[in-house]
Amino acid sequence: MSTELIKHSENGASAEGRDALYMLGGMALMLVGAGLVLQNPSVRRLLGQVSGAGNLLEAAMPDVERYLKIRSM
């Protein structure tokens, strides 16, 4: 049994499948994370007030600047 697995992994088919599985799993986790963030009432309120990508970035800049200040400490 173990020799079959070794032979199968030597040709790279197993590695490609594993990489695809990791990519799909990561995308699923990002989707779940985005859903959890959007469940927050303050995020919903912010997205309701801001229309357009430019306004959204403008609204997020104070938070980004605050994060960068904290990170540089």
Image: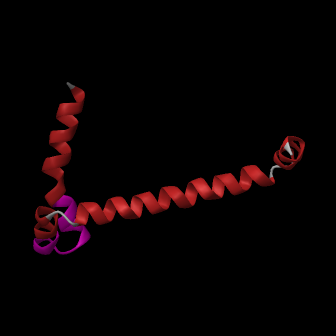
**Residue appearing at x 25%, y 60% in the figure:** 37
Please name the predominant secondary structure of the magenta segment in the image.
helix
Is residue 32 rendered to the left or right of residue 39?
right
Residue 48: name its quadrant: bottom left
Segment colored magenta: 47-58
Of the 4 image quadrants, the one containing the C terminus is: top left
Q: Nearer the viewer, residue 34 or 50?
A: 34
Residue 38 spot, x, y in % from top left: 23, 66
Q: Is residue 7 left or right of residue 18?
A: right
Q: Residue at x 89, y 42 (%)?
A: 3
Question: Taking 59 as reference, is 35 left or right?
Answer: right
Q: Which color scheme does this rendered protein use?
A: secondary structure
Vertical position of residue 42 compared to residue 10: above or below: below
Of residues 63 and 22, the one nearer the viewer is 22
Image coordinates of residue 69 in percent, x first then y, are 17, 33
Q: Nearer the viewer, residue 17 or 65?
A: 17
| Residue at 22% in and 73% down | 52
Q: Position of residue 54 (x, y in %)?
A: 22, 66
